Image (cartoon, rainbow, N blue to C red):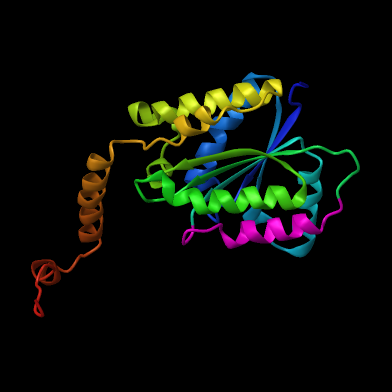
Amino acid sequence: MNKLGNVLFLIGSPKGKRSASHNFASYLEDQFKLKGVETETSYIVQHQKDEKLKELVKKAREKELLVMVNPLYIDSIPAITINFMEEFTREEVSPGKKQKLLAVFNSGFPEPHHNNLAIRMCEIFAQKTGIEWVGGITIGMGAAFESQGVEDAGFMSRNLKKGMDSIVDCLSLGNPVPSEAMLIASKPLLPLFFAKHGMCWFGGRMWKGKVHDESIKRNMYERPYD
């Protein structure tokens, strides 16, 4: 197997550098750099005009590994990423060019499996475009990483880091990625019982914090039609 030479990270969040997707990609990028792999990051939201989008697709076609990192939008892929994928399918493939695709999706739900449909879409995209499908990482509670990196999440990101590190090791050496590595990276960040109740509690505090009128706060829990 030939060692990996370069990788392009394609960030599909409209928030760009202020997104959880950026933070997930940053961790993976750092690990690839440690392995001596050349890395580059592009934010799809900055390439929406036709000319810019075509330039991004041409760049992507020249890379050995593409890593698409996206938030989940209504059980699907963000529209800006779909635009990129559609344009990518129109670009002529260089003869003998071999590429690989890894997809990473995060959602606000505690259960990572909500991302499965979007991951499957990326797998079909790889098949249609002649790219070798590496696999997909599914991450729940993605919003927890909007304000902190993977390294800063402590206990919560232990399995995510372990799985990602294993994936990077395999890809850097040109080896197949074992499904076990994807499963480890895709484990729930916290036990679901605590995650669900914790999100309800924090979510309630967040919404109540947005109400500044005390008279409304006093009546928030009324159920006149119950």
Is 195 covered by the magenta stretch?
no
Q: Position of residue 82 (x, y in %)?
A: 64, 59
| Number of disc labels | 0
Q: Position of residue 52 (x, y in %)?
A: 76, 57
Q: Main secondary structure of the magenta part?
A: helix
| Quarter containing the N terminus | top right
Q: Is residue 46 left or right of residue 28?
A: right
Can you tell which quarter of the image residue 217 is in? bottom left
Can you tell which quarter of the image residue 151 is in? top left
Q: Position of residue 56 (x, y in %)?
A: 75, 51
Q: Is residue 110 left or right of residue 28?
A: left
User: Which residues are the magenta region?
Assistant: 73-92
Point 9% across, 76% down: residue: 226
Task: Return the residue found at the far bottom.
Answer: 225
Q: Is residue 191 above or below residue 167?
A: below
Q: Position of residue 123 (x, y in %)?
A: 63, 48
Point 20% across, 53% down: residue: 205
Q: Is residue 17 left or right of residue 130?
A: left
Q: Which of these two is toward me, 113 or 43? A: 113
Point 47% across, 50% down: residue: 115
Point 28% across, 41% down: residue: 192
Task: Return the residue found at the far right.
Answer: 95
Is 74 covered by the magenta stretch?
yes
